[in-house]
């Protein structure tokens, strides 16, 4: 059994889309299982359907308005093209006055998910032999949960995809089945272990950060940038642990893991969605996967 696993990473998901496009269209990988966390959960259903061009169009045209109905921050560009965020005081106060527990709301993303993954496409996946799984964090029970398309109807599955992407406290906190749920990355950024537990003997894992730490984050300029830096640090640590555990489980189960890291740091704030950059990242992912799989050794060149 072969699995494609895609980590969380917000706007950096465009890079993962490019990697997946190469693996599916050029390398002809036939996956039995697709598992995604956060931005990865947005990709996996379309990749399982082989709707690469469709999801590419979505990823390379999405904007802040596509995600947020109440965006809690403003984007400010500094000299050198560096982007920073600051609190959108009006939106945050308005959201709190409405009784929200988070700074912003991401109901527009929920609508986008239902617009791009149709009922008929869901039915095709449901009847097919592939398993599509998304990762969510159950804050009430303090555990990570994996939601398979096999166990859901259309409305439920779209909602789990949305929940998997909700990067609190900037996006919506969802109460479902008596529990509070949020971004799957808070518990499992790259669910390699789950793929192997479910029977995968070969895993292609797309990890939306560099293999070796190359990032020296900019000093925090305000409370929001401090909060995003803190969460980024925590998620990086979670991802590192997921990879170590995944490698350990793979060695014990005789499974193979093929890692696809980003070769460079794509962005220091994955909550900023820009068409031009995401289009470039998609192509970068495609080129990188091609290079990784088709590079010729010096001996063969001779």
Image (tube, rainbow, N blue to C red):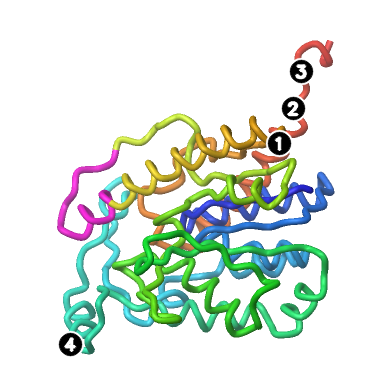
Q: Are marks 4 and 2 in contact (CB under 8 Å)?
A: no
Q: Which residue is identified by label 3? A: 297
* Numbered tag placed on residue 97 in the rendering: 4
Which of label 4 and label 3 is nearer to you? 4
**Mark 2 vs 1, N-terminal side:** 1
Establish if 70 lies above or below 255: below
Q: Name which of mark 1 and mark 3 comes first in the sequence.
A: 1
- Name the secondary structure under disc 1: loop
Number of residue marks: 4
The alpha-carbon separation of the residues under discs 4 and 3 comes to: 62 Å
Residue at the (81%, 47%) spot, across then down: 26
Q: Secondary structure at mark 4?
A: helix
Between 139 and 220, the one lying in front of the other is 139
Spatial separation of the CA atoms under disc 4 and disc 2: 56 Å
**Among numbered discs 4 and 1, the one appearing first in the sequence:** 4
176 displayed left or right of 48: left
In front: 267, or 148? 148
Q: CA distance from mark 2 to mark 3?
A: 7 Å
Residues in magenta, as a range: 217-230
Which circle, 4 or 1, is nearer the viewer? 1
Check contact, mark 4 vs mark 1: CB within 8 A.
Answer: no
Left or right of 82 on screen, residue 7: right
Reading the image, the residue beneath label 1 is 255
Q: Which residue is mark 2?
A: 295
- Tell whether position 142 is magenta: no
- Badge 2 vs badge 3, beta-carbon distance below 8 Å: yes
C-alpha separation, residue under disc 1 versus residue under disc 3: 25 Å
State the image coordinates of residue 226 (x, y, percent, origin top left): 20, 52
């Amino acid at each position: 059994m072969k699995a494609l696993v895609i980590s969380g990473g917000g706007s950096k998901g465009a890079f993962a889309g490019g990697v997946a496009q190469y693996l599916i269209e050029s390398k002809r990988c036939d996956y039995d299982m697709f598992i995604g966390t956060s931005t990865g959960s947005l990709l996996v259903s379309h990749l399982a359907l082989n709707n690469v061009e469709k999801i590419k169009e979505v990823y390379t045209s999405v904007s802040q308005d596509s995600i947020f109905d109440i965006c809690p921050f403003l984007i400010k560009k500094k000299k050198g093209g560096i982007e920073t965020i600051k609190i959108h005081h009006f939106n945050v106060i308005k959201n709190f006055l409405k009784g929200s527990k988070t700074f912003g709301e991401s109901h527009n993303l929920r609508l986008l998910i239902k617009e791009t993954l149709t009922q008929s496409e869901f039915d095709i996946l449901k009847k097919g032999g592939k398993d599509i799984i998304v990762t969510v964090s159950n804050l009430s029970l303090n555990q990570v949960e994996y939601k398979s398309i096999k166990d859901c109807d259309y409305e439920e599955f779209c909602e789990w995809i949305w929940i998997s992407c909700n990067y609190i406290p900037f996006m919506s906190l969802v109460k479902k089945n008596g529990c509070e749920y949020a971004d799957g990355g808070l518990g499992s950024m790259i669910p390699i272990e789950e793929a192997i537990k479910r029977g995968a003997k070969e895993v292609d894992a797309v990890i939306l950060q560099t293999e070796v730490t190359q990032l020296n984050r900019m000093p925090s300029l305000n409370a929001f940038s401090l909060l995003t830096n803190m969460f980024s640090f925590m998620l990086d640590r979670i991802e590192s642990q997921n990879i170590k555990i995944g490698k350990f489980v793979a060695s014990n189960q005789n499974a193979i893991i093929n890692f696809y890291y980003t070769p460079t740091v794509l962005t220091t704030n994955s909550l900023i969605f820009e068409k031009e950059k995401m289009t470039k990242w998609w192509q970068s992912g495609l080129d990188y996967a091609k290079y990784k799989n088709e590079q010729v050794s010096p001996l063969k060149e001779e």
